[in-house]
Amino acid sequence: MKRRRFLCGALALVPLAARATVTAGIPYPAAERGHPLEFPRDFGSHPAFRTEWWYVTGWLQRADGQPFGVQVTFFRHRPRIGEDSSSRFAPTQLLFAHAAIADPRLGRLRHDQRAARAGFGLAEAAEGDTDVRVADWSLRREGNVYVTRIEAREFVLELTFAATQPPILQGERGYSRKGADPRQASYYYSEPHLRATGNVTVEGREASVTGTAWCDHEWSSDVLAADAAGWDWTGINLADGGALMAFVMRRRSGGVLWAGGTLRGADGSVRVFGPDDVQFTPQRSWRSLRSQVTYPVATIVAAGGQAFELQPLFDDQELDARASTGTIYWEGAVRARIAGREVGRGYLELTGYGQPMRLY
């Protein structure tokens, strides 16, 4: 009951912040071409920017070998509210978190979420290195290992994700365009092929798990163009040790607004894709009985002359986060195939299909 009261109070911050008056304050900085990313500094938070997220997805398995997906995401948002106030209660930084397990034996996501304003020991996103928490949920980086603990309503995650490869700097050395206007961009890097170990508890039964994961870290102040509906994104850990990231930004009127991605080969070489190099071609759709939204859950991603067939672990991987970030989207574990042969595993994210995506 204590946790429920905390969550209800924290979620109330979102509509209150939306109604509050934005202060003049310090303007949001823009992502700029040529700005070098520096580590470990850029593993940490960038509080001057409007929006930031740390996004970990992976394929895990228990001792019986049955695979399932897992997702842990922390968001930070600067609403520019109360920045001229000396009150500790001013919501100058808001933190949100989502976590989900995609278990094909259940046929739907187990999902939970948290939200709070930064401060008071309840929520923080540290600068200098990854260390973000919302109440009793946390993701922090210790050396080359991410450690997360998530105590949700239907499950508990106690996992580590150890780096086995250097980060991929997306776009132009970490400057990732999302539209025709150069200001529609983010700073963005990915860490593929993280070695996942730990414990997952579901329905009171704890099990040791192993697997492979992917971490994205992205921050920006102006990602979406006015006519953008949302995006399709995928991150795939390839079986040969390579990694694929690809995305398309979709127009509200239909068609593609922008696209991009990278392909790291097994030899470590990296190919960067521009707007004309990436296409998502839906092959099969699934309609949610809860939201009545239809998603293209099976698709072909063409990137740099290769065509990857993405097939979901199961169809119902819709994530309803309307209680925290106000969004509902499909985010699920997928297999990647070429000519029917499995060549990798990862995640597919489909946003803006019910209504246009909005970033706070």
Image (cartoon, rainbow, N blue to C red):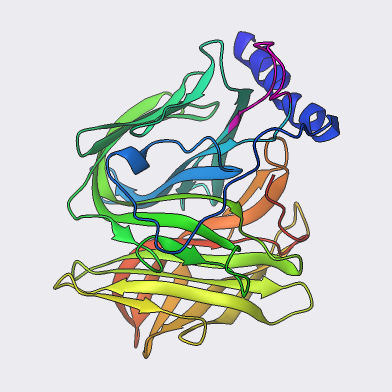
Residue 252 shown left or right of residue 271 in the figure: right
What is the quadrant of the N terminus in the image?
Answer: top right
Residue in the picture at 80% in, 31% down: 15
Q: Is residue 185 above or below residue 273?
A: above
Quadrant of the snapshot with the C terminus? top right
Residue 287 in the image: x percent, y percent? Answer: 70, 65
Residue drawn where x is 80% and y is 35% of the image? 18
Is the magenta region chiefly helix, strand or loop? loop
**x and y, in percent, of residue 69 in the image:** 41, 50
Q: Is residue 240 left or right of residue 184?
A: left
In the rendered structure, does residue 152 fall within the stretch colored magenta? no
251 vs 288: above or below? below
| Number of residue marks | 0
- Looking at the image, which residue is at 81% across and 27% down? 16
State the extent of the magenta-drawn residues as a range: 82-95
Drawn side of residue 298 relative to residue 310, left or right: right
- Measured as percent of width and height from the top left, residue 198 is found at 26, 33
Residue depicted at x 63% and y 35%:
78
Question: Would residue 73 be visible to someone looking at this image?
Answer: yes
Picture quadrant where residue 158 is located = top left
Q: Does the magenta portion include 90?
A: yes
Residue that extends furthest to the left in the rendered view of this protein:
267
Q: Which one is nearer the viewer's eye here, 92 or 203?
A: 92
Q: Is residue 313 visible?
A: no
Residue toward you, 351 or 299: 351
Horizontal and vertical percent position of residue 230: 66, 64
- From the viewer's perspective, tell me whether residue 70 is left or right of residue 122: left
Q: In this view of the protein, which residue sits in the foreground, 73 or 345?
A: 73
